[in-house]
Amino acid sequence: MEYLPTALEGPVIIKPKVFGDSRGFFMETFSLRDFAANVGPVQFVQDNESYSARRGVLRGMHFQKGDAAQAKLVRVSRGRVLDVAVDIRPDSPTFGRWVKVEISAQEKNMFFIPRGFAHGFLTLEDDTLFEYKCDNYYSPADEGSFRWDDPQVGIDWGVSPSEVILSDKDRIAPAFSSLRG
């Protein structure tokens, strides 16, 4: 696998080696030994899957607080997404900055988002299947979010707000400034 750093310290783009022939392909999607040597130690404890029927579904910006914080390794097994990580570490020099990457079933690339980052994604195709590993269990009491279109963060999603399909919860998410309390 190839591990590519991003403009922010922590998030990493991962490109697996894909072995294809007339039958299809094979690829390794995770190796603890390889990951630890290139990114750092991690122990994933939960796998999640999200299906979006339509292009334009936006899920984010989500995070877990305190001891419930989660690192995620995300991939797309069908379709294509724009994936975004925002630094929410209070003492970080890059607090509030974001990095984005397009990940797709065709490219087979993955994206690692460490603890201390909010996460969100926008589906770029209908019928998209998004999968991710977490290094901590989901805790509803420690869930946090902020608006996907918060002007203080200024994420460039590449779409107009009228094209975005949100959950009720994401529609009423607080402003990014609420993180500083």
Image: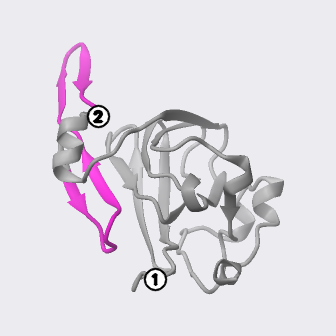
Q: Nearer the viewer, mark 1 or mark 2?
A: 1
Q: Position of residue 46 (x, y in %)?
A: 51, 34
Cα distance between the residues tagged 1 and 2: 31 Å
Q: Which residue is mark 1?
A: 91
Please tell me which residue is depicted at 70% across the width and 71% down the height of the picture: 147
Q: How is the image coloured?
A: one colour
Q: Residue at x 62, y 43 (%)?
A: 138
Q: Is residue 2 visible?
A: yes
The amino acid sitting under disc 2 is: Phe
Mark number displayed over residue 44: none
**Screen quadrant of the C terminus:** bottom right
Which quadrant of the structure image shows residue 148?
bottom right
The x and y percentages for residue 62 are: 62, 59
- Which stretch is magenta? 3-30
**Residue that appears at 22% across and 39% down:** 16
Return the residue at label 2: 30
Measuring 51% from the left and 80% from the top, which residue is drawn there? Answer: 90
In the image, residue 5 lies in the stretch drawn in magenta: yes
The vertical placement of 30 against 100, above or below, is above
Name the secondary structure under disc 1: loop
Is 14 in the magenta?
Answer: yes
Residue 45 versus residue 82: which sits nearer the camera?
A: 45
